Image (tube, rainbow, N blue to C red):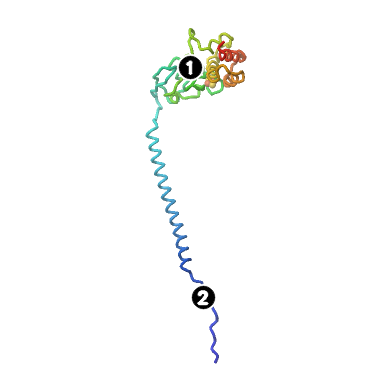
Amino acid sequence: MTRQEPPFEPAPPRATPADHATRVSRRGLFKGAGAAAVSAALLGARETLAREAAVADEVRTQGPGLVPITLRVNGEERKVQVEPRTTLLSALRLRLDLTGAKPVCERSQCGACTVWLDGQTVYACSVLAVEAEGREVTTVEGLGTPSDMHPVQAAFCAEDALQCGFCTPGMVMACAFAVKQHGKDLTEDQARAAVAGNLCRCGTHPHVLRAALRAAKGE
Ligand code: FES
Ligand code: FES
């Protein structure tokens, strides 16, 4: 009898130590990555909470009732009580009796309420009084007095740069800012740009521009 050879069956592939190591390390990697992500998220959340708590400690909660604040207006410290929603314009006019800045549109469109905040023109109707605390506020009353006028105020008189006068305090503040910025080099275009956010219903703009240039040149 001839001996029958068993049919050839190739040996099943074996996992090599290298394969095993690779599989283990992939699984480990995913497990590790998941754990790391969870820990990072927890750490991140903890840090965020800690940061928010620190900010909350620093942030002063104000209102909704009256809040005592100190405003620095025209070089003087003025203590007032305002609601957090009170605008700088209302605080100036109703609490401090500085009525130069005018309420007209009360929505940042006409410029009648223009004052300086830290030397920059702003619409006082669109700044909260509490936001102005600790900053330098200058109103038209602080620019000059009838007996000692600012050059821009004097130039407005000389150039007849007003009719009803309602826009005038805001125009004066905007022009005085342009003169402060450009000095005697102020051009008509720059003056025009300076009062671009100030409307005059009486149409006095040409006189306003002449007044600004006159003040800049020290005439
Ligand atoms: S009242 Fe403030 S811009 Fe008109
Ligand atoms: S002078 Fe009347 S709004 Fe300007």
Choose the circle earlier in sequence order: 2 or 1: 2
Identify the secondary structure beneath mark 1: loop
Residue 55 location, quadrant: top left
- The residue that disc 2 covers is 11
Q: Nearer the viewer, residue 53 or 182?
A: 182
Q: Residue at x 62, y 20 (%)?
A: 189
- The numbered disc on residue 148 is none
Residue 12 point in image, percent of width and height = 51, 73
Quadrant occupied by the C terminus: top right
Q: Residue at x 41, y 22 (%)?
A: 82
Residue most extreme to the front:
185
Q: Nearer the viewer, residue 215 or 2?
A: 215
Left of 187 or right of it: where is 98?
left
- The residue that disc 1 covers is 139
Residue most extreme to the left:
57
Residue 72 point in image, percent of width and height = 42, 20
Label 1 packing within 10 angstroms: few (<14), some (14-19), many (20+): many
Q: Is residue 129 shown above or below 166?
A: below
Residue 179 point in image, percent of width and height = 54, 17
Left of 128 or right of it: where is 204?
right
Identify the secondary structure beneath mark 2: loop
- Amino acid type at image mark 2: Ala
Q: Mark 1 near ligand 1 (CB under 8 Å)?
A: no
Residue 31 point in image, percent of width and height = 44, 57
Total numbered labels? 2
Label 2 packing within 10 angstroms: few (<14), some (14-19), many (20+): few
- Amino acid type at image mark 1: Thr
